[in-house]
Image: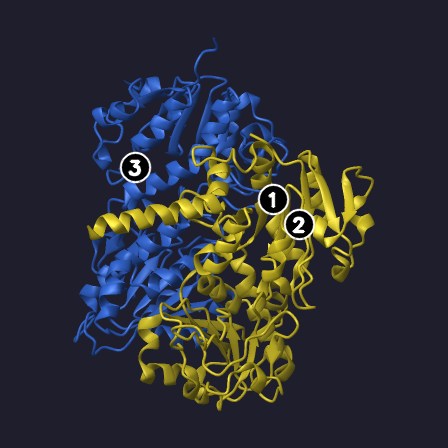
Chain colours: A yellow, B blue
């Protein structure tokens, strides 16, 4: 059993607004596990970190090229590398990233063909199938914060003209929806909410509904007419059908803000085609996540065949946690630390489902576990059909 | 060869409805890790397990008396033992239980005077302060499950299951850790199966209004909301127990069929200054023996006189909501506590835990009585034991 000795940290080459990098403290932690860390030149520069911030007299921290960062025993990058970049990863390297095996079959095939020992961060789960590396709270809070920021620009101190509480309508009652309720009732920012309440502000109230209420247009019209903020936190069973048809947006007050926490894309060439939950809204990124109704990009981001006549200011971001990059990466580092210990102690091949709590969780994130699960499911399905 | 650590698992001799004990799978794991496990006679009987069930998975387990269990090196019991039971512990032993150090200074003092080490389950936390042993989800889901069962009976024609009725109006007061679960539980009638069945028949769902504690002071808003609320949930964690969230006179505004769900389960204490009251004024305090209260229930006669009980609706309250489904509850606690015990046994005892060590050692370090000394205790509270609350 060989254990990894080196780790590379390549930059994420996504939108310019993507500033997230693993923080110096976390890299120091990795070095403390006995690894030599290789950081791509310019790593953290968008967040104001220099190589010296990482190095800080640690003899085992080095600067390297992008290619080299993908060639180490372990390569760690939060968002999945771009399709072409998988070729840079050395055969046998342990690639740790958000790889989303269940919805990225082509990526899984690529990983397998290239002999990459992948660990998908989104598949690391404990015995109760609870993800150990996630930041759904930030999805909800950052999205609601952006919405209230916008409202504050039209309603100073977030006081409605009639002095009543701001009404937030949240569709979807899953994990993100739960966090959205808390974030909504605290105006997306606890400090702002405390100041608001201390000055006797009217606050905000949240109404949460699931799909059996959404299916009733009469109820929805009544709810929409009262909503100042509409939040899509759904996880649709059928992504080819929107939750909110574009026509319904006309029921919202003109000042209303639509918050997209589901961030599904438009993929009309897929079979069946995939559309966004709230029909006719654009999909944002860390470069731009606020879209006023007169934003010229609206038409270029929404396919022509999708109805988008009715518009309300929309806040939407593919990577909501990245809005506050340092807080996000500090959060991920805390979640990763005990997992990295096991990886560097046991190595990819030594990680077992029979190990301790974190080892079992880590095992579930490996490509080998995913492929085994798929193979077992195929055998079971075949047996069932015989 | 070093001697095995002895672990005693005691039963909880509390109300009759308290049936929870740790499951055979946890006991088997403790034994597999090298501990010698002692169970109290009748352990697991409340949830249908026999001695044979435990022996099947853990062949070396021994059944002993209540007193003998308390003689072991480590004693595990979910809810804190009584003061008399604490006196049974041996000096140097370690008690693992929901001990609530911050609000129980007298208990801390007693344990220390007896020379006992302790690990408080409610203090086992990770670096972010997140509790490792908790079942807040069950607090919300079990409370709402019972609340909707009662609403099923009280809801007027055409009935809760009719697709002709309007959406049910649920109001959650308090949007913290329990409140978040309550929002989800309420939107699903407190029971996934019922939710799926009604949704499949196109029965209108539940519209949940969530109000933060700060907003409850807005009387006009609250009265408007309460007047259309079918099921009201108190999920607040009030900084001051003297502050009423829903005064009794506001209950009058609610529909006759409305149900009041108490997830906060704060007590009444008229001897305190100022007097302490439940969040929803005038509803009874329930437990696992009785958690559903009709408006004419005799128990209202025993609510302290400093509390107004004039206006009543059906109420549900239980200070151990997770205990409603004991097996599921203990399966979860067992899974959560397993790595803690593995760490303790692996280190050869609590005394060898390094509070600066690995993840679970650090968590245990935060929950040790011996390391609690430097922390300023909070004022004593008359709150009852709520092992499952944050």
The percent position of residue A35, horizontal first and vertical second, equals 69, 37
The numbered dot on residue B315 is none
- Residue behind mark 3: B20
The numbered dot on residue A70 is 2
Q: Is residue A82 visible?
A: no
Compare residues A186 and B304 and report the one nearer the observer. Answer: A186
The percent position of residue B162, horizontal first and vertical second, equals 19, 74
- Of all chains, the one bearing label 2 is A
At a point 25% along the width and 24% down the height, the residue shown is: B56
- How far is the residue under mark 1 from the one under mark 2? 8 Å
Compare residues B87 and B36 and report the one nearer the observer. Answer: B36
- Of all chains, the one bearing label 3 is B
At a point 69% along the width and 33% down the height, the residue shown is: A34
- Residue behind mark 1: A93
* Circles 1 and 2 in contact, beta carbons < 8 Å: yes
Image height check: is B224 above or below A369?
below
């Amino acid at each position: 059993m060989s254990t990894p000795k080196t780790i590379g940290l390549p930059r994420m080459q996504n939108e310019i607004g993507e500033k997230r990098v693993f923080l110096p403290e976390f890299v120091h932690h990795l070095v403390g596990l006995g690894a030599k860390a290789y950081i791509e030149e310019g790593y953290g520069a968008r967040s104001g970190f220099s190589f010296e911030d990482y190095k800080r007299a640690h003899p085992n921290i080095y600067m390297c090229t992008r290619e080299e960062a993908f060639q180490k025993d372990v390569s760690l990058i939060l968002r999945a590398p771009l399709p072409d970049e998988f070729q840079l990863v050395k055969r046998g390297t342990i690639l740790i990233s958000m790889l989303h095996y269940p919805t990225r079959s082509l990526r899984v095939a690529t990983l397998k063909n290239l002999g990459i020992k992948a660990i998908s961060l989104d598949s690391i789960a404990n015995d109760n199938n609870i993800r150990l590396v996630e930041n759904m709270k930030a999805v909800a809070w950052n999205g609601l914060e952006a919405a209230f920021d916008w409202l504050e620009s039209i309603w100073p101190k977030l006081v409605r003209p009639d002095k009543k509480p701001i009404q937030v309508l949240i569709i979807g009652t899953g994990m993100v929806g739960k966090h959205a309720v808390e974030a909504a009732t605290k105006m997306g920012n606890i400090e702002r909410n405390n100041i608001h309440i201390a000055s006797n502000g009217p606050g905000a109230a949240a109404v949460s509904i699931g799909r059996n209420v959404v299916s009733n247009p009469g109820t929805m019209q009544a709810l929409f007419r009262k909503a100042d903020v509409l939040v899509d936190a759904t996880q649709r069973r059928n992504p080819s059908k929107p939750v909110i048809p574009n026509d319904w947006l006309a029921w919202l007050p003109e000042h209303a803000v639509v918050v997209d926490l589901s961030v599904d894309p438009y993929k009309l060439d897929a079979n069946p085609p995939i559309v966004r939950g709230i029909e006719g809204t654009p999909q944002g990124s860390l470069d731009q996540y606020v879209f006023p109704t007169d934003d010229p990009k609206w038409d270029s981001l929404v396919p022509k065949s999708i109805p988008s006549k009715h518009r309300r200011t929309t806040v939407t971001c593919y990577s909501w946690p990245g809005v506050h990059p340092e807080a996000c990466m500090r959060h991920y580092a805390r979640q990763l630390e005990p997992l990295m210990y096991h990886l560097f102690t046991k190595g990819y091949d030594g990680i077992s489902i029979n190990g301790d709590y974190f080892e079992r969780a880590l095992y579930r994130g490996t490509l080998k576990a995913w492929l085994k699960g798929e193979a077992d499911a195929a055998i079971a399905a075949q047996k069932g059909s015989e | 060869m070093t001697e095995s650590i002895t672990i005693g698992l005691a039963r909880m001799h509390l109300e009759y409805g308290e049936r929870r004990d740790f499951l055979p799978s946890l006991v088997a794991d403790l034994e597999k890790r090298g501990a010698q496990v002692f169970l109290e006679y009748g352990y697991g009987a409340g949830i249908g397990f026999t001695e044979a069930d435990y022996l099947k998975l853990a062949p070396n387990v021994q059944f002993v008396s209540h007193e003998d269990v308390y003689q072991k090196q480590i004693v595990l019991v979910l809810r804190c033992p009584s003061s008399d039971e604490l006196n049974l512990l041996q000096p140097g032993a370690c008690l693992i239980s929901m001990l609530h150090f911050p609000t129980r200074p007298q208990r801390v003092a007693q344990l220390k005077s007896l020379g006992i080490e302790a690990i408080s389950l409610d203090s086992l936390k990770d670096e972010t302060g997140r509790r490792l042993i908790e079942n807040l989800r069950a607090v919300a889901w079990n409370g709402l499950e019972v609340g909707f069962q009662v609403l099923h009976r009280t809801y007027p024609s055409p009935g809760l299951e009719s697709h002709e009725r309007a959406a049910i109006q649920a109001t959650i007061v308090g949007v913290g850790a329990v409140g978040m679960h309550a929002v989800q539980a309420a939107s699903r009638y407190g029971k996934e199966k019922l939710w799926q069945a009604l949704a499949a028949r196109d029965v209108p769902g539940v519209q949940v209004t969530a109000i933060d504690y700060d907003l409850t002071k807005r009387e006009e808003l609250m009265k408007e909301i309460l007047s259309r609320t079918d099921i009201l949930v108190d999920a607040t964690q009030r900084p001051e127990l003297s502050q009423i969230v829903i005064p009794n006179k506001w209950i009058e505004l609610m529909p006759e069929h409305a149900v009041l769900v108490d997830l906060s389960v704060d007590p009444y204490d008229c001897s305190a200054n100022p007097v302490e009251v439940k969040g929803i004024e005038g509803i009874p305090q329930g437990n696992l023996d009785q958690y559903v209260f009709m408006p004419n229930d005799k128990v209202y006669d025993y609510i302290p006189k400093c509390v107004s009980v004039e206006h009543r609706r059906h109420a549900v309250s239980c200070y151990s909501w997770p205990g409603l489904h004991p097996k599921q509850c203990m399966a979860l606690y067992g899974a959560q506590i397993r790595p803690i015990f593995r760490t303790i046994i692996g280190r050869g005892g609590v005394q060898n835990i390094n509070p600066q060590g690995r993840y679970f050692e650090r968590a245990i370090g935060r929950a040790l009585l011996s390391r609690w000394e430097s922390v300023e205790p909070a004022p004593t509270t008359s709150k009852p034991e709520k092992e499952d609350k944050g």
